[in-house]
Amino acid sequence: MFHLSFFIFCISLVGIFAIVGSGFRKEIGLKDVKHLSLLFFVGSVGSLFPDVPAVWNYILNGSMQHTRIWMIPTHSLLFGIVAFVLAMMLGYLVYRDSSKAMSLGIFAEAAFLSHLLLDDIAEGGLTYLYPVYNEPMSIFVFMNVRLSGVDFFYYNFACFVSVFFIFAVMFMALLALKDLGFGFRYEPIE
């Protein structure tokens, strides 16, 4: 539930803002509800996609093992390509527009990456770069480092890099949502 909540309230906040605003203005029709349902479905599945093996492992083995499908780690960028391609194919089937299909794929990938970032924070490292580099690595290495334990430059650089990755995932979602019909619009104050 935490991955899903983080996706809905942090990654797709612009979409929620637009839905609420459109709802108050009574601008949402049946076609819009289908479009919004597709977005939330794809984003929700994308945010839970790395944990897919947990479902059948729980049913078949009674365990919650969920980090691999055969030899491929599900918490890797390689497995994220699967989420992107599946969402892009679904987007093309629904919209018949390659730009919107690509945006739906990017939106699913942003949801997938939000899952990886949260697990990285909690577990202290994932095999992001499988099969190129098979050891766990963490984007958030600075979280357990005291400023007195490292030099000032390293500490600030590590903080910047970590925040940048979170920003990049949120920006991916914003750009995808903008292409899919959501976005903020500046209205000058009179």
Image (cartoon, rainbow, N blue to C red):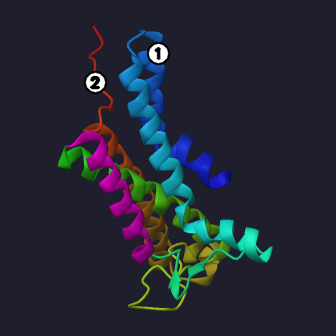
Label disc, if present, on residue 186 of the rendered structure: 2
Vertically, is 85 above or below 16? below
The local crowd at label 2, few if under 14, some if 14 to 19, many if 20 or more residues have their Cα within 10 Å, is: few
Left or right relative to 65: residue 179: left
Q: Main secondary structure of the magenta part?
A: helix
Vertically, is 77 above or below 168? below
**Percent coordinates x, y for residue 60 in the rendering:** 74, 74
Residue name at image x 47 percent, y 35 percent: 37
75 falls in the magenta region? no
Distance from disc 2 to disc 1, alpha carbons, whole Å, reads: 19 Å
> SS class of the residue under badge 1?
helix
* Magenta residue span: 77-96
Please name the residue that numbered disc 1 is placed on. Answer: 23
Most extreme residue toward the front, as rendered?
60
Please state which of residues 91 and 182 is positioned toward the viewer in this rendering: 91
Asked whether residue 9 is in view, the answer is yes
- Say which quarter of the image contains residue 174: top left
